[in-house]
Amino acid sequence: MDSILLLDKKLKEFTEEEWTKLFEKAILIKLPKGSTVFSVNERPQGVFIIKSGWVKISRISKDGRESVVGCIRNPKEIIGLAEVLLNKNRTCNAVAITDIEIGFLRTEDFYNIIKEDFNIALKVMRLLAERMREAEENVHNLSSNYVSKRLISFLYKASFKWGIEDLDGIKIPLNLTHEEIAQIVGTSRQTATKALNALQKRGVIKLEKRQIKILDIKKLVAPFR
C-alpha cells in the first residue's frame, strides 16, 4: 500500500511565500457546487489554483458514463497544468463538488513565474511526476484488483491526503455521494454501495450521511498485507 502514497509531501508542497506569488496575478473566482471549471476540448487559457473547496477531474464515455480520472483535487492544488504545458485542448472536465474559490492564472503569467522561480518550477515538475505515478497506480488497480480492493485503495489514499483524526477514527471530510465514489473506483453505484456496506458491517468504516469515517486503518488495509 505504501506505493500509493507516492512522493513525499515536503518535496512538492509550496511554501506560503510561493503560494502568495502564484496568487498575486491570479483572478479569484467563487463558484457554487456543480459548476464547471473547464471542459473537454476547451482551449486552455491558463491554470487554476484551488483556494477553497474540492474539484473532481472526470471524463464522460461514449455511453454517457462518468469516471473520475484525476481523483479529487483539494485546496492548494493546481489543476489544468498538462494542457497549458502541452498547448493542447482539455481532455477532461473539472467540476466543483463543493462551493469553491479558485484562482485563474493566465498562461503567460504562469510561464513567467516558473521561468523566474526555479523552486516553483521544480515543484510543478514533481507535482506532474506524482500525478503520472498516480495514473499508473489507478490503471493497475482497475486492471488487476476487485472493486473492494479499489475502494480500499481510495479510502486509504483519501485518509492520508485529507483525513482528520477523530476520537474513534479518521474522518474523510468529503461529502461524496455513492455515485461519485463509484466514478472514482470504476464501478456502478449499486456495487460501490454494496462494498461500502460490507466494510461497515466488518467494523472497518462508519458511514455518516455523506461522510466516511475509518474506524480501523489496519483492518482496512489487511487485504493488501
Image (tube, rainbow, N blue to C red):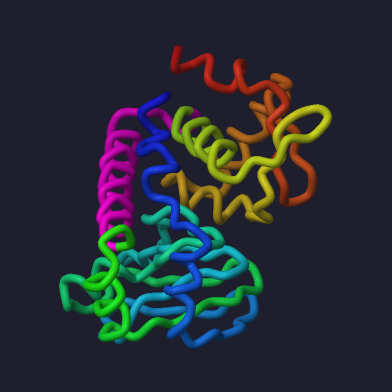
Q: Which quadrant does the C terminus fall into?
A: top left
Image-quadrant location for residue 81? bottom left
Image-quadrant location for residue 41? bottom left
Q: Which quadrant does the N terminus fall into?
A: top left
Residue 104's place in the image compared with 200, above or below, is below
146 within the magenta span: yes
Residue in view at x 41 percent, y 25 percent? 2
Residue 90's place in the image compared with 132, above or below, is below
Residue sitting nearer the eye, 27 or 164: 27
Q: Is residue 98 left or right of residue 150?
A: right
144 within the magenta span: yes
Residue sitting nearer the eye, 127 or 187: 127
Spot occupied by residue 94 in the image (x, y as percentages of width and height):
44, 71
Spot occupied by residue 172 in the image (x, y as percentages of width and height):
66, 44
Residue sitting nearer the eye, 215 or 192: 215
Residue in view at x 61 percent, y 83 percent? 30
Residue in view at x 42 percent, y 56 percent? 68
Residue sitting nearer the eye, 144 or 27: 27
Q: Residue placed farthest to the top in the image?
A: 225
Q: Is residue 21 left or right of residue 138?
A: right
Q: Is residue 128 left or right of residue 182?
A: left
Q: Residue placed farthest to the right in the image?
A: 167
Q: Main secondary structure of the magenta part?
A: helix
Task: Please provide the residue range marked out in magenta.
Answer: 121-148
